[in-house]
Image (cartoon, rainbow, N blue to C red):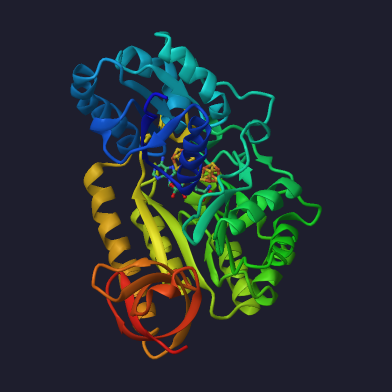
Amino acid sequence: MSAPRKLFVKTYGCQMNVYDSERMTEALGGEGYVTTDRAEDADMILLNTCHIREKAAEKVYSELGRMRALKDANPDLKIGVAGCVAQAEGEEIMRRAPMVDLVVGPQSYHRLPAMDRAVRGGAKALDTDFPDDDKFDTLKARTKMKRAPAAFLTVQEGCDKFCAFCVVPYTRGSEVSRPADRVMREARELVDAGVAEITLLGQNVNAYHGHDAGLAGLIWDLSAIDGLKRIRFTTSHPNDMDDALIEAHGTCDKLMPYLHLPVQSGSDRILKAMNRKHTAESYLKLVDRIRAARPDIMLSSDFIVGFPGETEEDFEATLELIRKVEFGQAYSFKYSTRPGTPAAEKPQMPEDVMAERLSRLQALLTQQQRKIQDDMVGRTVGVLFEKPGRIDGQMIGKSDYLHAVYADAPADVLGQVRQVRITVAGTNSLGGELVR
Ligand code: SAH
Ligand code: SF4
Ligand code: F3S
């Protein structure tokens, strides 16, 4: 038998790409590939790319530039580009980077095995269709190999919201939900392989309609799986937080007290220009309802500064909203002009204004995050231990609130949720001791 071919996958972008990379790796496993973490050893390199901001998209071309030397050293090496840049710029990639053999979009990667065979035969392969056949029907069951304790599971893809700044509706297509019975089957496969925590993924995960009772219905069904200890979901849109989902945060023990609920801006004028279809006030009211159901919930958000036309007053309104909510975690970005989106047509803000606002915004968010972390000291929380730490005898895991937590613990805590009393708060993690 010939030696197995080696696959090197590099993943950019959001958690959905992390999930897709796993599925692509499994699909190519059937073609005799094993993974390697050294690009130099690979017979196939797959870049799973992100198009959300200009910097993310440009990274692909610089990465491809670096890979030219590998291709010169190994003429049999095949290079593939997957993900959202593949979808948005597939033909341009083939033109700009002739060493690319294969381009595959996020909705067509179940066709990778056939594409691999084509490129092995010396052809080029490009597939950026939004095919009628469901990729999940073609992809095989999840691997039975022992897995890490926390896993992602995509349940919904695509977006129909068309925020004025965003490429996702174009790169991922319209909203599609996977039927609940398929999700349940995959969840059981994951739990059988050692998974204790599942994060349900979707670009608009709370618009999930593959279950009669929506995402909350799916969460309740999942919570009946023995061995599954924790459930999370991301990313949700404020307009799709229905009553049942809010209530589940208060009543479903396995649903963790953490919610990523992007608001983008605190100015109604900007929210309108962004086509977000909610106001600052409706967001704040929603936060109140969620906190009424689950008072200790940790909230996180995404923010964009410097959206076209954002005045100092608009920006102040964002700071004001942040002060009111108190976020435990947040991601913030300078607005990035994306070709083909409505906001790209508007006059753009000067770079220095965006940079200055971003640093003020981040200073406030960091201060809030720090305070919330400091307040954890002395409290006891559940921690799912995921891996050994760098220091001997130390184990690292995630708290119910998604903090990184380290503690001295025996190796057999891996994969278990244990109670930990927090003793120190650092910038990015908490330290504690096992109580039982
Ligand atoms: N579906 C999710 C987020 C998808 S993209 C949602 O609706 O919230 C993740 C984040 O990237 C967005 O929340 C937004 O803050 C940021 N983002 C998207 N397009 C951007 C752009 N053109 N410039 C800067 N940030 C952007
Ligand atoms: Fe993009 Fe808006 Fe859809 Fe989120 S809801 S993916 S930000 S268009
Ligand atoms: Fe990026 Fe596509 Fe995710 S653009 S953020 S990889 S959906």
> Measured from the top left, where is residue 171 in percent x and y?
51, 31
**Can residue 155 be seen in the rendering of this structure?**
yes
Name the residue furthest right: 212
x 50%, y 45%: residue? 19
Q: Is residue 424 above or below residue 403?
A: below
**Can residue 233 be seen in the rendering of this structure?**
no
x 34%, y 33%: residue? 57
Name the quadrant containing residue 110. top right
What is the total number of numbered labels drawn onto the structure image? 0
Q: Nearer the viewer, residue 181 or 217?
A: 181
x 34%, y 18%: residue? 100
Q: Nearer the viewer, residue 28 or 105?
A: 28
Lateral position of residue 73 relative to residue 238, left or right: left
Q: Is residue 192 above or below residue 292?
A: above
Lateral position of residue 73 relative to residue 24, left or right: left
Name the quadrant containing residue 351. top left
> Measured from the top left, where is residue 156 in percent x and y?
63, 45
Q: Is residue 263 above or below residue 258?
A: above
Name the quadrant containing residue 411. bottom left
> Measured from the top left, where is residue 325 in percent x and y?
48, 72
Q: Is residue 91 above or below residue 49?
A: above
> Measured from the top left, where is residue 264 in percent x and y?
46, 54
Lateral position of residue 383 relative to residue 99, left or right: right
Picture quarter with the N terminus = top left
Lateral position of residue 116 relative to residue 364, left or right: right
Name the residue furthest front: 1
